[in-house]
Amino acid sequence: MKRHRCSFAAALALLAVGLQAPPAAAQLVEFKAGIADPASSVLAWWMAEAGGFFARQGLRVQIPSVGGNRGLEALQAGRIDVAHRGLSNIVRVNQAGGDLRLIGSLGNLMRLSFFSAAGVKTAADLKGGMVAVSNFGAESDIAVTLALQRLGLTRNDVTIKEFGDTARRLAAVKSGDAKATVLSEPFTSLAREQGVNVMVDLAAERIPWVFTGIAVKRSATTTDRDRLKRFLRGTIEGNYFAFTDEKRAKEVLAKELHVTDPKLVAISYNDYKLQTPLNIEPIGAENTIAQFPGVSAKIEDYVDTTLLDEIRREGFITALQQKYNLR
């Protein structure tokens, strides 16, 4: 009887982790996970592809680049199934009448620091100048508000303009086209090495913040629940794979980010491990929501953790912990 119980428990663990043979390619269900731009916070998805975890969950996942705010437009229009966006974006869209939810987090800390152009050392130097963000309402936009607060300024004291991706924003600050911007790794380290001035180091404050998450239409949490759970399981195992196989993770990062410098790859990987919740639980949502006066303060109006709760109750997390010897 004891042997029977052990065999049954082992079988359940294998089932929970999804180690059964993946379905044939013809049987895989199409799934689109849109990203703004390639970034280290996408590593869980890339590793899930590399490890075959999405396929084991019965999914053929595409990860197209769909731009910043355009990604949320594509999500609402049904052209993609999930979007890689921060909680600030969800609050903004819902404030305007949308109905999105984050169902998992790929980064639970504010990851940006505020850099300024040559000759801009003080708040007085910055006042009246141009500040570059990626897109209005994005995490870089909200981070600018936080940085200005640290300097005793408000958004009314500067002109804020959309400049696009991080490389463009760094170039704008170095050329003087913008007086300041916020950057994340590996550009943070690059900027420091190149002597770009750090005005406010928000990343060093380690502010709990749902910086990057998995956004869906709220209706999909009911109508497409099983497929979303399969995608989340693949994502979580992608994290376990990345955390425990540094060599493979760095290879995937180098390939997907088109980075050849081992130092920059190492910076990106270390930043990923520092910021990423292993089991993708959102933490710090209240800090993000507080930046939007007048909106609902109820976390459940923007975040739905019920799918993750079910996945945990079904034993998937316990099985992964045993498989990877990681907690």
Image: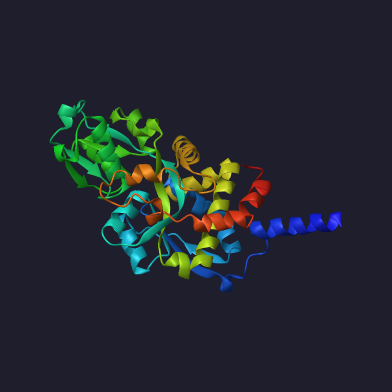
In this rendering, the answer to whether 206 lies above or below 107 is: above
Whether residue 78 appears in this view of the structure is yes
Residue 227: x percent and y percent?
A: 52, 66
Q: Quadrant of the N terminus?
A: bottom right
- Which residue occupies 15% across, 37% down? 157
- Which residue occupies 57% across, 41% down? 246
Decide which of 201, 152 is in the foreground and name it: 152
Left or right? Give the position of 112 relative to 245: left
Whether residue 49 appears in this view of the structure is no
Decide which of 230, 51 is in the foreground and name it: 230
Counting the numbered discs, the total is 0
Q: Quadrant of the C terminus?
A: top right
Looking at this rendering, what residue extends furthest in the right direction? 1
Q: Quadrant of residue 156?
A: top left
Residue 250: x percent and y percent?
A: 52, 43
- Which residue occupies 35% across, 29% down? 193
In this rendering, the answer to whether 117 lies above or below 307 is: above
